[in-house]
Amino acid sequence: MEQAERLWNSNYVKVWLANFMIFFSFMIVTPLLPLYLSDTYQADKDTIGLVLSGYTLTALLARPIAGFLVDSYPRRVVLLTCYFLFFAFFAGYLIAGTMTLFTMVRTLHGAPMGSVTVANSTCAIDVLPSSRRAEGIGYYGLSNNLATSIAPTAGLMVYDYVGNYDTLFVIALCTAGIGLAINCCVHFPVKEILPDKSPLSFDRFFLLEGWSEGLVMVGIGLSYGVLATYLAIYGKEELGMSTGTGAWFAVLCVGLIMSRLVGARTLRQGKVVENVNHGILVSVFGYLLFAAVKEPIGFYGAAFIIGLGNGHIWPGMQTMFINLAPNNKRGTANSSQLTCWDIGVGLGVVLGGMIIHAIGYSAVFWFAFIVNILGVAFYFAYVRRHFITHRLR
C-alpha cells in the first residue's frame, strides 16, 4: 500500500524525464531559428515571422485531435507514435536544403509537438497514485520549466563554440531520441478502452464542462502572449536594454520553479482552488508592475512575480480540468487546457501588435493588465464556484 502511494515511482520519473527531453530538444533550437533563417536563406523579418508562425497553427489544430486519440485508443501506442514523429522531424531540419522545405518541416513539426505534450501529460497522470495526483501534476511542470530555462542558454553556448547550426539540430534529434527511448521503457497501467459509438461531436475534442476555466486560461495566455512577444523590442527601444530578454525568462523560470515547489505542498493537501486563488492574485500584480514601472526593476520584478503566479496557476488549473472530466476524457481535459492557452497567446500576439502600431507600448501592457484583471474577476465571481459544484473528485 505504501509503495502504491509513492509519488516518484519509476514510471513517473521516466515520463517526467521524457517530458524534459521534449522541451529541451525543442527549445535548444527555437531561439536560434530566426538567426538561422537570416544567415542561411537571407530571410527578412517578415519572412521569418511567416515561416515560424506555421508551427503555432498546426500545434493548435493538433491538440484537440490528440486529446481525442489518447482517450479513444491505447495511450502507449498514441504516445510512442506522437513521440516518434516529434523525434523524426528534427532530421528534417538537417536535410531541408531550401526555404520552402524548411518552412514545410517547421510547420508540420508543430503537429507532433502539440500532440506529444498532450499524450505525455495524460500518461503522467495515469502513472500517478490518485491520492497524490494534484501534487504530481505540479512537479511534472517542473520538467517544462527546467528545460525551458536551460535549453536556450545551452543552444547559444554550443553555437558560439562550434558556429554551426547543424550541430544544434543533431543535439535536438539525439535528445528527442533519448526521450523516446525512455518512454519505451514505461509500464503503463492497463486500461480498458470502451468504444464510444456515439457520433463525433465537439465535446469529444473539447471538455465542455471546463468552458469557464478555459476562458480564464485564454485571458492568462493573452496577457502572457503580449509580454513574451513584445518585451524584447520594448526593452531595447524604451529601456535601452539590448540583452534583457534571456535574463527576463531566466528570472521568470526562477519564480515558476519556486512556486511549483511551494505549491506542491498545498496540492498534496487537496487545496486546488486555494492554489489557483493565490496564483491568480499574485500574477496580476506582476502585470501591473510591468505596465506601471518603466524601469529595469519593473521589468525584472514583473518576471519574477508572474513566474510565482503562473507556477501556482498552471498545476491548479490543470487539476481542475482533470477533476471536471471522467477518467475516459483525461486526454480531452489536458488538450482543452493547452488549446485555450494557445488561443490566448495567439490573440495576445495579434492584438498586441495592432495596439502597439496604433497607440504604443505603454497602452499594450496596460491592455495585458486589464485583460488579466477581467480574468481574475471572472474567476472569483463564477469559475471557482463552478468547479466546486461540478467537479467529479
Image (cartoon, helix red, strand yellow):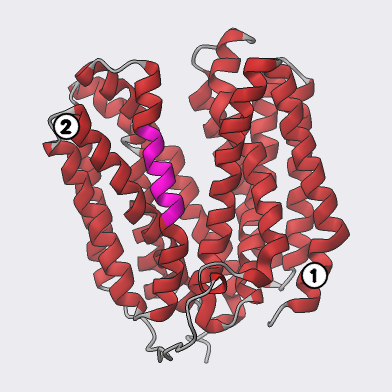
Horizontal and vertical percent position of residue 290: 72, 26
Determine the main secondary structure of the stretch shown in magenta.
Answer: helix
Horizontal and vertical percent position of residue 53: 41, 35
Circle on res. 40? none
> Closest to the observer: 255 or 110?
110
Horizontal and vertical percent position of residue 283: 73, 42
Circle on res. 166? 2
**Element at label 2:** helix
**Which span of residues is magenta-colored?**
52-61
Callouts 2 and 1 close, C-beta under 8 Å: no
The structure residue drawn at horizontal position 40% and vertical position 57%, both measured from the top left corner, is: 62
Q: Quadrant of residue 94?
A: top left
> Closest to the observer: 45 or 170?
45
User: In the displayed structure, would residue 310 be above or below residue 155?
Assistant: below
**Element at label 1:** helix
Inspect the magenta stretch and tell me whether residue 367 lies in it: no
Residue 273 visible to an observer of this rendering: yes
Q: Amino acid at mark 1?
A: His
Q: Using residue 75 as the reference point, say whether residue 347 is left or right of it.
A: right
Quarter of the image with the C terminus is bottom right
Q: Amino acid at mark 2?
A: Asp
Q: Quadrant of residue 107?
A: top left
Horizontal and vertical percent position of residue 347: 60, 39
Residue 186 visible to an observer of this rendering: no
Circle on res. 386? 1
